[in-house]
Amino acid sequence: MLSSSLQENLSRFEADFDGSVDFILRRLRVLGLDAAFLSMEGMVNKQIASQSVLNPLVSAECRQKTPMETFRYLCDCVLASVDQKEVQEYPEALNLLMSGFALFLLDGCHVILAIGIQGFSFRSVGDPQNDKMQRGSREGFVEPVQINMTMIRRRMKTTNLKFEKVTMGKESNTFVCLCYLKDRISPSLLADLRTHLQKAKLDAVLAAGYVAPFLCRPDRFSLFSTVGVSERPDTVCGKIEEGRVAVLVDGTPHVLIVPHLFMENFQSFDDYAARPFYAAFTRILKLVAFFLALFLPGFYVAVSTFHPEMIPGPLLVKLVQSELGTPFSIMGEVLLIHIIYEIMREAGLRVPTTLSHAVSIVGALVIGDTAVSSGLIGAPTLMVVAVTAISSYLTPSLYEPVAVSRLILILIGGTIGFWGLTLSAFVLLINLCGENSYGIPFSAPVSPFSRRAARDLLFRSGWRKLGNRVEKVQDLPGSTRQS
């Protein structure tokens, strides 16, 4: 609880901040009473603070009988034009102060007035960096969660849209927001999600990646994440309309979506703006590219090493001629080129923009020309790795599990052969079908199959059919959740 003594409350704030240079304390004299105005440097709008708060306070003339009556008069008459909230607990006041609110304290009052005049700088709304669309909106989420909430609310003008606040991080006290449609969300799913977040014991939450592991099942290991990620407000709105929950984390432009299904990795918002036949074409193309990115290098190594009879004669002759002058085995070549490619990719992501062109040129010279001309690797191997790398870009959300699994499959294909790859494929399939996301099968609506949900699987139906009824995730076959 707060004290009615101004000096005691100020001593408490000063002791906690202990001379921190961004803590600003300004003492005032308002209507004959001692007062104080607290703020954090760079987090409040100084012009609004001066014109709408400080000037009206020092110019007020109508004094009341008691300090509390004076406080009420100032709130209702003098500061009525600004956003305000009365606080009676010290931890809440401290949290609001460090969130960009200014605090007004009056001697003789055990209540603090939090004034919403935030003015910190943030990146303006612009194109999403990763979720590029041809026909969709050009708006992408930004770091402040309040702006992200506004972008969702502007697209879904319904009172069923709810935003629920959760604070995470012992030291950071990060604002995490749950967004859902009240009439579509499963109550048990929402309760489960709240429980998972409450169990997350973290000192600081600085990005959405800190929260994502706590939204997955802790008792199972899966190569594929059951938590979706999006930078687009329109995509998030479409997902929560299907009965999902969006998790917005303050300070990050990535929104988490649960539950997330595996087949959604091959869908994009452009599919719903394009003609159905072209949407089906692009989805099938992404599925084919996924299998190429995952299995092509391992299959190439296995066939070349253990099953050369599966290769057509003319192609086999070309392959043998190319590999005669190389010092490594085919498995060694593929592993070497993949490791070099991953190094170049990581360098391209981390280096400054001014050096990115230099990295691309060096990569093209090293991998594309010098390695082949010097006889270090064969041209067919380079072709296989290039097709694999390009294919992995079509499903960027699956890049991490595919990149690791691909190296494992290369080793299996080079040591056990085609039958080892077949066994590995079954293991991946079992892992995929055995996973669930909050009681909803991760492989749905393929397994278990849903004829109604198949309208928007690989072959998308037209809006005349899709618009009749939105399929909710908790209604999929095999789900343990209920609407």
Image (spheres, rainbow, N blue to C red):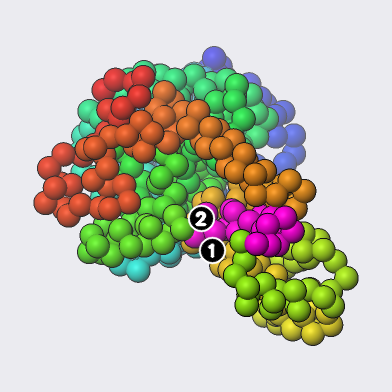
Residue at 54% x, 14% y: name it: 1
Asked if 426 appears above or below 379 in the picture, the reply is above
Asked if 165 appears above or below 391 in the picture, the reply is above
Q: Which residues are magenta?
A: 289-309
Instruction: Depth check: give the residue in front, 22 or 421.
Output: 421
| Residue type at numbered disc 2 | Phe
Say whether marks 1 and 2 touch (CB < 8 Å): yes
Residue 199, image x and y in percent?
57, 20
Residue 287, image x and y in percent?
44, 55
Residue 401, image x and y in percent?
61, 46
Q: Residue furthest right?
A: 327
Residue 164: name its quadrant.
top left
Report the Cα–Cα distance between label 1 and label 2.
7 Å
Residue 473: name its quadrant.
top left
**Image quarter (top left, top right, bottom left or bottom right) of the C terminus:** top left
Residue hosting label 1: 391
Residue at 36% x, 62% y: name it: 282
Instruction: Depth check: give the residue in front, 74 or 134.
Output: 134
Asked whether 135 falls inside the magenta stretch, the response is no
Instruction: Depth check: give the residue in front, 473 or 127.
Output: 473
Asked whether 298 falls inside the magenta stretch, the response is yes
Residue 408 relative to residue 373: left or right: left
